[in-house]
Image (tube, helix red, strand yellow):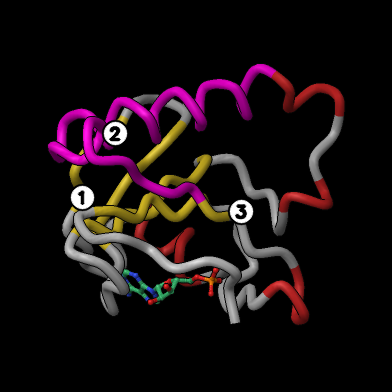
Amino acid sequence: MTLFEKIINRQVPAEIVWENEECLAFRDIHPQAPVHILVIPKKNISHIGAVQEEDAVLLGKLLLAATQIAKKEGIAKTGFRLVINCGSDGGETVPHLHIHVLGGRALQWPPG
Ligand code: AMP
């Protein structure tokens, strides 16, 4: 079982900011910006490269949740970034699909 599944099951504590039947959002334990939240599906999907046609609606809901959380966190007007790391070169360290919601400061580009 992955770390994020344990957070979904409340086996590992996390600062949960939003939840519904299909998705969960919680603060990143090592924040890279004043606001750094992870939005995940409760469905076990290891990475964005593993999604199927049947996940299309769920993916839309995750993106909608991420933008609503950005509004709730007060970073929608100043701007924010959504990041999905995939696999080892993408920098994915937890093999459960997650969207990083980052904001509250000017973020640099390109990524390292
Ligand atoms: P990634 O590198 O894209 O796979 O992102 C995984 C993220 O999970 C990292 O930003 C970590 O800081 C974060 N993380 C790891 N353990 C925890 C935890 N127990 N609670 C919240 N976030 C975590």
Snapshot quadrant of residue 52? top right
Q: Which residues are magenta?
A: 57-82
Q: Earlier in the sequence, mark 3 or mark 2?
A: 2
Snapshot quadrant of residue 9? bottom left
Amino acid at dot 2: Glu
The numbered dot on residue 97 is 3
Q: Quadrant of the C terminus?
A: bottom right
Amino acid at dot 3: Leu
Is 60 colored magenta in this rendering?
Answer: yes
Q: Camera-side residue: 107 or 24?
A: 107
Q: Residue at x 35, y 60 (%)?
A: 7
Q: Position of residue 36 (x, y in %)?
A: 29, 60
Q: How many marks?
A: 3
Label 3 – label 2 distance at C-alpha: 16 Å
Q: Position of residue 63 (x, y in %)?
A: 51, 30
Label 1 – label 2 distance at C-alpha: 8 Å
Residue bearing mark 2: 19
Label 1 close to label 2 by CB (< 8 Å): yes
